[in-house]
Amino acid sequence: MQLCNTNPLENPNQETLSNEEKLAQLSKLEQDKLNKIQELYSLSFSDLIYLAQSVHRDNNNPNEVQFCTLSSIKTGACPEDCGYCAQSSRYKTGLQIEPLQEEEKILTEARQAQANGSTRFCMGAAWREIPEGKQFDSVLRMVREVKAMGMEPCVTLGMLNADQAQQLKEAGLHSYNHNIDTSRDYYPEVISTRTFDDRLQTISHVQEAGIHVCSGGILGMGETQEDRLSMLATLASMDPQPSSVPINVLVPIAGTPLEAADPIDNLDLVRLVACTRIMLPKARVRLSAGRLTMSDELQTLCFIAGANSIHTGDKLLTTPLAGESRDHRLMERLGMKVAA
Ligand code: SAM
Ligand code: DTB
Ligand code: SF4
């Protein structure tokens, strides 16, 4: 793993450590990043946005937004206990369970997504880890076909090993989405069936296979501001940095432990987008879950702060989105272009 940090959880006395002592265990790099993010976060809103927009202009086309369409290729019945997720078998969320979908059905969705302006197509499966055999072979074929259409194929399939990462690379996979979701400290409050280090391990396999990493998190799960900044410090310390960072705002799902979590303040969201842009200057900063309930004005502030990609379409994985036409209308109103 090229993440330059020491794992405080490897210390069995972790629980007895003060916050200061835990911090002292973070690597110099990650701690430096955290200090810088804290400084950025304490700037006036206007100074922070000015800086983020300057970094954005130096590294990206500020008038361009990439559209990415999601498809749930295997839905629900997941053994993991992620406290936010509609697809965990631990919670009664009323979700319709669907087995791995037919390849042709998914490829039809990909063609439609491309016709609607998306250049990236992300296929998600509610697996703890990728199963070997026929199901993985089918996913590999879908990746090959999406690549052949000229789109960026992305998948999010749970944990994987080095050999599976290699096979995905050979099939032409552009990106693997695997979120760290929150800070190392807050992670066990949200998920107990795997660790933060399990996530980093999968990310390391993805990096080593030469596949782009797409990794981000969820805001509004009851975490503190410090947790959010610490999550960002972890992402910014990865080497190479993720080439895409999805920023999800929790979509509260009835029946999950986080159904009534306090929502994130809108201006805090914009500040976090700005800090992400500054700390990961070249990444696609992607507005992901939570956009259905965001006003056009809030989304615009996020674009000004450096967001340059969205998940579009009628649906994320299991929850609704407003459809591409709302997104195209907003692009037109702002004089911005959908990345070709
Ligand atoms: N099972 C795989 C995994 O967990 O890596 C892939 C699918 S999982 C649904 C993809 C990501 O969606 C999660 O890592 C989480 O960040 C995000 N997500 C899931 N449910 C969400 C919700 N209710 N609100 C916001 N983001 C959510
Ligand atoms: C990511 O970070 N967000 C997307 C994508 N990667 C796979 C998924 C969001 C899921 C939101 C809840 C749902 O629709 O089930
Ligand atoms: Fe399963 Fe992924 Fe949902 Fe967690 S986030 S319950 S691993 S589908």
Image (cartoon, rainbow, N blue to C red):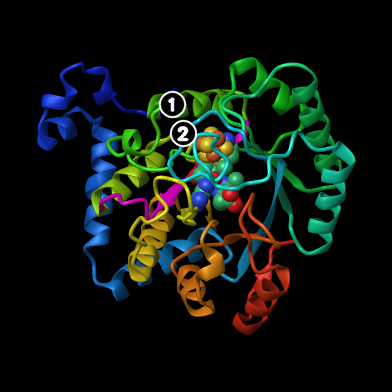
- Please give left or right for residue 136 compared with residue 189 in the image: right
**Quick one: label 1 or label 2, which is nearer the N terminus?**
2
Q: Quadrant of residue 103?
A: top right
Position of residue 27 relative to residue 50, above or below, is: above
- Mark 1: secondary structure: loop
Which quadrant of the structure image shows residue 286?
Answer: bottom right
Q: Viewer-proximal residue, 322 or 96?
A: 96
The residue lying at 42 percent from left, 35 percent from top is 238
Q: Quadrant of the N terminus?
A: top left
User: Does the Cβ of the disc 2 residue fall within 8 Å of ligand 3?
Assistant: yes
> Label 1: which residue?
193
Say whether residue 309 is visible: yes
Mark 1–mark 2 distance (CA, rounded to whole Å)? 6 Å
Q: For the residue marked with disc 2, what is the amino acid?
A: Asp
* Span colored in magenta: 211-224
Residue 15 is a magenta residue: no
Q: Which amino acid type is marked by label 1?
A: Thr
Instruction: Quadrant for residue 11, please give it.
Output: top left
Q: Residues within 10 Å of mark 1 (few under 14, many from 20)?
A: few
Query: Residue at 40% across / 34% down in the picture?
Result: 191
**Residue 280 at x, y = what percent?**
44, 50
- Residue 314's tag is none
Label disc, if present, on residue 81 of the rendered structure = 2
